[in-house]
Image (tube, rainbow, N blue to C red):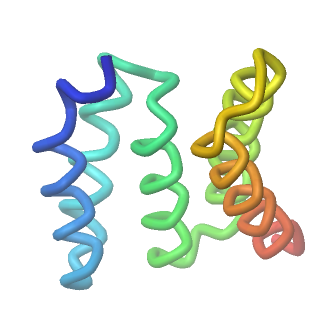
Amino acid sequence: MEDQYAAEIGRAWAHLRQGNATDALHEFEEILKSAPSHVDALYGLGLTRVAQGQKETAHSTFQKCLEIVDKERAKGHNDRWEMLQRMISQRVKETKSA
């Protein structure tokens, strides 16, 4: 489950907050090698790519993330998925002009 990646996600977010996008990118990509549908890692990867000026790549990452969230939302109401859907949809719009 996603909880097994909590420490890695924490490190990746810490790198991103500290302005170290290169290390954040590495951490998020490592998680995604084992768990390609890990929504938190995909979202973080998208934000990291935005930080690196890779708006087009960030857009496709957010799109993939949104597809996963949309599938989960279709299974029934869940506050987490609803919140994520709104957040990610906003990022898709922000990066669309790439």
Residue 36 position, x and y percent, is 46, 22
- Residue depicted at 72% across the width and 66% down the height: 91
- Give the total of numbered labels: 0
Residue 70 position, x and y percent, is 79, 31
Q: Is residue 90 above or below residue 53?
A: above
Give the camera-side residue of 60 and 41.
41
Residue 41 position, x and y percent, is 40, 43
Q: Quarter holding the C terminus?
A: bottom right
Give the camera-side residue of 94 and 60.
94
Q: Residue furthest bottom?
A: 19
Give the camera-side residue of 90 and 96.
90
Q: Quarter holding the N terminus?
A: top left
Q: Is residue 95 above or below residue 83?
A: below
- Residue depicted at 45% across the width and 30% down the height: 38
Q: Is residue 18 above or below residue 85?
A: below
Give the camera-side residue of 88 and 3.
3
Residue 18 left/right relative to 57: left
Residue 80 left/right relative to 38: right
Residue 28 position, x and y percent, is 31, 45
- Residue depicted at 25% across the width and 84% down the height: 19
- Residue depicted at 55% across the width and 78% down the height: 53
Q: Quadrant of residue 30?
A: top left
Q: Quadrant of residue 48?
A: bottom left
